[in-house]
Amino acid sequence: MKRTRMSVLLAAGGFTALAGAILTWGRYGSLVTVSATASVTLWAMALICVVLGRRVRENVDHSNIGMDRSQLNPTTAALWLVVAKASAWTGAIVGGWYVGMATFVVPKAGTLTAAQNDLLGVVTSAAAGVALAAAGIYLERGCSVPPSPDGEPA
C-alpha cells in the first residue's frame, strides 16, 4: 500500500472546502444547524489514531513486531494502517467541508443569529477534521514497514 500524499489530501480538502463554501454562501438558510457535538466523533477518532500511532512507533523503535504474544502482530499493524488511511481521508474531506462553511459563518456571526449559533460547531468541526487528518497521517507513517537490513523486500 502506498503512502498517502499530503498534496492529494490537501487537494481533496480544498475541493470540499470550495464545495462547502459555494453551498453555504448560496443556500445557508436551508442548511441544518451545526451543533458543537458534531465534532465529538472526529476528536475521538483523532485521539485514537494518536494513541495507536504512539503504540506502533514504540513497538517499531524497540523491534517489537512479530507473532509472539508480547509483540505487536504485523496483521494488527496492517489493520491499523487501513484505519489510518481512512482517518486521513475522512479528516481532509470533512474538515475541508467545515472550513468552507466557516468562510460564511465566521464573518456573518456578528450580524446573523443563525451564523452566531453555528459558529462554535463549525469551528470545532473544522479543527477536528484537520486534527483527524493529521492524526491519520501520523498513524500511517508509524505503520510503515522499515526496510529490511539485508536489502530484500519484505
Image (spheres, rainbow, N blue to C red):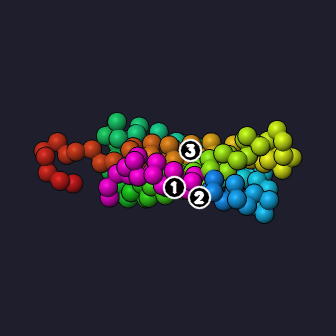
Residue 100 on image: x %, y %:
62, 50
On screen, residue 3 above or below 31: above
Name the side, left or right, on which 41 lies relative to 63: right
Q: Nearer the viewer, residue 121 or 136?
A: 121
Q: Nearer the viewer, residue 150 or 33?
A: 33
User: Residue at 33% across / 48% down in the picture?
Assistant: 144
Please tell me whether mark 3 or mark 1 is closer to you in this view.
Answer: 1
- Tell me if residue 42 is in the magenta stretch: no
Marks 3/1: CA–CA distance: 14 Å
User: Which label number is shown at residue 130?
Assistant: 3
Looking at the image, tell me whether mark 3 or mark 1 is earlier in sequence order.
1
Marks 1/2: CA–CA distance: 6 Å
- Mark 2: which amino acid? Ala
Quarter assignment of residue 75:
bottom left
Looking at the image, tell me whether mark 2 or mark 3 is earlier in sequence order.
2
Q: Residues within 10 Å of mark 3 (few under 14, many from 20)?
A: many
Q: Residues within 10 Å of mark 1 (few under 14, many from 20)?
A: some
Q: Is residue 7 visible?
A: yes
Q: Nearer the viewer, residue 151 or 115?
A: 115
Q: Residue furthest bottom?
A: 30
The secondary structure making up most of the magenta span is: helix
Please tell me whether mark 2 or mark 3 is closer to you in this view.
Answer: 2
Name the side, left or right, on which 110 lies relative to 83: right
User: Residue at 82% across / 38% down in the picture?
Assistant: 110
Residue 152 on image: x %, y %:
14, 51
The stretch in magenta equals 1-19
Name the side, left or right, on which 95 lies relative to 65: right
Residue that carries the numbered disc 1 in the rendered image: 15
Residue that carries the numbered disc 2 in the rendered image: 19
